[in-house]
Amino acid sequence: MTRPPSRPARSWGLLALLIGAAAVPALLSAQAVDEQAAVYGLDARSPVPLTSQIFEKSCVGCHGADMTGGIGPSLIDATWIHGGDDAAILKTIAEGVPDKGMPAFAASLAENERLGLLALIREKGTDYIKARTVESLPFPTGPQTSAHAAFRFETVVGEGRLDTPWSILFLSPDRMLVSERPGRLRIVTTGGEVGPPIANVPAIVHDFGQGGILGLARHPDYRRNGYLYLAYTDEMPDRFGEARKCAGRIYCFSTASQLKVIRFRLAGNAMVDRTTIWQAAPESYRLSPSFGGRLAFGSDGMLYITVGDRAYSAMEAQEVATPNGKIHRVADDGHVPPDNPFVGVPGADPTIWSFGHRNPQGLAVDPRSGRLWSSEHGPRGGDELNLIRRGGNYGWPLATFGMGYDGRPFDPAYPLGHSQAAIELTAPSRPIDRAGFIAPVVHWTPSIAVSSILFYSGTAFPAWRDSLLVTSLRQQKLLRLTIEHDAVTEQELLFERHGNVRDVAEAPDGSLYVAMNLPSQIIRMVPAMK
């Protein structure tokens, strides 16, 4: 099925500046405005549209046309990583944040231009807060009701005790392994005890905005062999000219990285018997984000691994010779299963199971059918839920229901928006069958920033049994989907506005454990009387 890209109208308009703000000195003179307009290829105009155009030219690709965030964080939600006063914001604009991929603008933007950006950010922030409909609120203490069940929230690990929990994996009825994206694994008990960092975990030097210690999985025969699996971002120097490919663009890091999967056991509070299960060739290491990083064992006993397109390498998602933008399938010891679809295909990566993916961060098996499902971040809009098929092509970046971060129709040459220089595209190494693209079962536009997914199989919430639970970062939601005959027949909102929902796990007793980011905490959902 062909998936036509949507063509929504641009939502970015020219905004007025706060000319009289006490903290903002006078803006550019009319003459300076005309001179700078020529530099940006614009007609002579007043400072108001010029500053908006400077934002569009320099910032939209990362922070979104409405400043609510895209690849980078929101500029208007009053959450500041590097300080929120005027001086701190101006310093960030001037000096950039190199370890997060933000370039410095001191040389390319004059002081008054940077002050104009500050004024624009402040005005939009004020307007946004006034009109805001999604706030992070404390979890309620009383019973909550949904269409089919009643539940209540319990805090397992409160704010400040974990840093960006990314994955929850139960090891026993009362112990779970939790990955913290910045570089730690910890044992956490259902009673809320947080253990010290586990020793011998791979070192994370840079998190690359989205990388670090990511997905976890447990061997199907874990009780006998003790095998656990971890996906994380491995690093190496740029040896293959990647800096030239993305030089001067946002999210172009100085160190190359790629997803890597290891198998290990726990001995006390240490990782032992580390074995590499999946590692891509050094030529596939990139300087950009979009890693994927979720793991799941299939009903066939094989390990499935999601790998993102790495942003500037979006077209690689269509190339079966490279690992990026794919879901991979290996045996529990890392060997290539002989029935993988590209085994024996000249030049192809034999671990590929499906391709044409952007940034899949959810992976789950339907216990009724054994079918594999994946959730995938779109660009601006076009988040997807896909039913994964052997050898399937899911279309990215040639088909999407989303658009570019700058509000224009998505173009693979401008993966982070037209504010960045075009990426040189090479001709595909083989014909691409667009008619064979597999459409998503569901897509979410605008984006919900979909993260992990889970098929519920417990008894604590019998009405939810076999439902698919879907987590959402940006829209801060936990959704419940009913799936019948491989189609979604119902979507229900279980909760929203309590922070970014990163992961959901089912405990042996059927209760649900939810990893929250911003703020970082772990919440338990248990049955309640209606």
Image: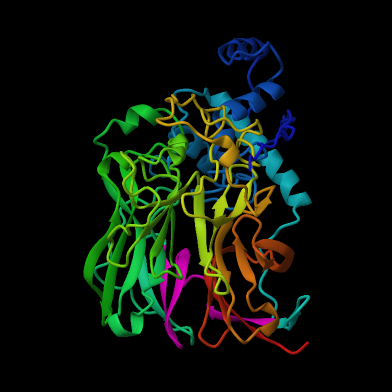
User: At which x and y percent is residue 340?
Assistant: 38, 54
Q: Can you see residue 398?
A: no
Q: Residue shown at 43%/35% (left/top)?
A: 95
Q: Residue shown at 50%/53% (left/top)?
A: 360
How many discs appear? 0
Q: Quarter of the image containing the C terminus?
A: bottom right
Magenta span: 151-180
Location of residue 368 (image quadrant): bottom right
In reply to whether residue 169 is colored magenta, the answer given is yes
Residue 285 drawn above or below residue 464:
above
Q: Can you see residue 310?
A: yes
User: At which x and y percent is residue 294?
Assistant: 45, 60
In reply to whether residue 353 is colored magenta, the answer given is no
User: At which x and y percent is residue 20?
Assistant: 73, 32
Q: Residue shown at 27%/71% (left/top)?
A: 264
User: At which x and y percent is residue 337?
Assistant: 33, 59
Give 12 or 47, whichever is nearer the viewer: 12
Location of residue 262 (image quadrant): bottom left
